[in-house]
Image: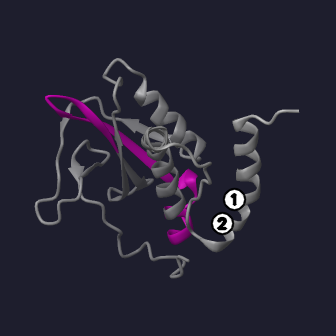
Amino acid sequence: PSVTREDAARTWQEAAHPALTALLPSCAVEPLLPDAYFPALRRTDEEGRAFTLRACVEQLHSQNGLASTQIQAVIAPCYDGNLVEYRIGLLRQGHPEVLQGAVWGLLDGEEETTDVLGQIQDELQRAGVTAIEVITERLPLSYCDDCGAPLFPAMDGELTHTVMPDDLQPASTRLH
């Protein structure tokens, strides 16, 4: 019987995921098969966006003890003339501070009419985040003047820097 690439990927992930998770506690891991250079780059661009969201939720859970049900996501489209990316701010429900953020850049062939927003919402729900707010206002690509980090949307629709409040202390000091 012939083995498909999908079969090999599934077997590899089932075997490697427990070992990598044990080696890298508090980290999201996703074992992938090797591939040719350009297909691997494209796959990384596509899958990296969703992985980033899952990793942000996992970090808030493992380092700060927040369950995914305690996390609220705010999604905002950011423009530089045209829609360039979505920025996702992750907040503790009932609190104004943006704790973590992710950038979901558009790839070739994606535009405003593509259901990228639906993909983002699906990935957040897969990560267990069900409180999702979508900002419909066109926001600019904004970065921190001091450090150059991207700014992420808060509940009020303003782009802001991520900050970890004093009352939310790390649950663990060991990353890996």
Question: Is 138 left, or right, of 45 in this rendering?
Answer: left
Where 4 sits versus 101, above or below?
above
- How far apart marks 2 and 1 lie (CA) works out to 6 Å
Residue picked out by circle 1: 17
Q: Tell me if label 2 and label 1 are in contact, CB under 8 Å.
A: yes
Q: Is residue 76 magenta?
A: yes
Magenta residues (range)? 60-87
Along the line of sight, which residue is nearer the eye, 92 or 125? 125
x, y percent for residue 86: 32, 38
Q: Residue furthest right?
A: 1
| Quadrant, the N terminus | top right
- Furthest residue toward bottom: 173
Q: Residue at x 36, y 76 (%)?
A: 166
Give the residue number, with chain letter if any, for mark 2: 21
Q: Residues within 10 Å of mark 2 (few under 14, many from 20)?
A: some
Label 1 sits on a secondary structure element that is helix
Q: Nearer the viewer, residue 109 or 115?
A: 109
Amino acid carrying label 2: it is Thr
